[in-house]
Image (cartoon, helix red, strand yellow):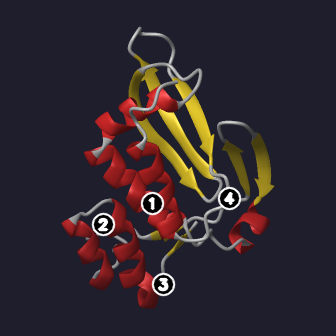
Amino acid sequence: MSTVPAGERREAALAVWERVPDEELLAAVDHPPTAGGWDAPLLARVEPATVLYETYDSAGVIDGGDFRAAEPDPLTGAAERIIGHVNDCHRDELGAALGQVPAAPEGAAWLWELDRHGLTLWVAPYDRGRPVLVRLPWSDPARSACDLERGLHELLAHRNAPR
């Protein structure tokens, strides 16, 4: 772990602000932590040595150097925004859309994952059964944020279809 250099503090603070808006982050831009105490939050860079991951259908280990060298998927930012919007505003529609998914339990649904290959719903069954992840793949990989939105719209638009 290392402290973010002065010339990069503003960009680092804004990146954190996007996830967790906090007025104290702005203090970290112009006022680094002092040796005698903390006048501002510490902006630190963490460089993982090893990354352990677990998804709905796989798990593994990635070397930290390989992880740091990898470019993020260009759809990640759009997918995160879409997930937030859908979970904030369209949860009822997601639950209703489960009616078109064979073998999916009826229940409260959250959009858990959204990527170029499909989406994953977290479903808490109404019968108080164990929550399940339901993966719905796209017929073709998404190439843009519009493709992600189109796939979700198709799911939600056919929410009353019989099983």
Q: Would residue 94 appear left or right of 69 to someone viewing this image?
A: left
Residue that numbered label 2 is attached to:
38
What residue did someone put label 1 on?
Answer: 149
Q: Residue furthest bottom?
A: 7
Q: Is residue 139 left or right of residue 1?
A: right
Along the line of sight, the residue nearer the viewer: 4 or 61: 61
In three-dimensional space, the C-alpha distance between marks 4 and 1, rounded to whole angstroms, equals: 14 Å
Which residue appears at 75% of the width and 40% of the height? 59
Q: Which residue is mark 3?
A: 5
- Which residue position is annotated with label 4? 140
* Mark 3 residue element: loop
Relative to 47, does residue 99 appear above or below in the rendering? above
Q: CA distance from mark 3 to mark 1?
A: 38 Å
Counting residues from the start of the chain, the first of labels 3 and 2 encountered is: 3
- Looking at the image, is mark 4 or mark 1 earlier in the sequence? 4
Give the residue displayed 70% in from the left and 52% down from the top: 51
Asked if the residues shown at circle 2 and circle 4 are in contact, with their CB atoms under 8 angstroms apart, the answer is no
Sequence-earlier tag: 2 or 4: 2
In the image, which is nearer the foreground, mark 1 or mark 2? 1
Q: CA distance from mark 3 to mark 2?
A: 16 Å
Which residue sits furthest front? Answer: 162
- Residue type for callout 2: Trp
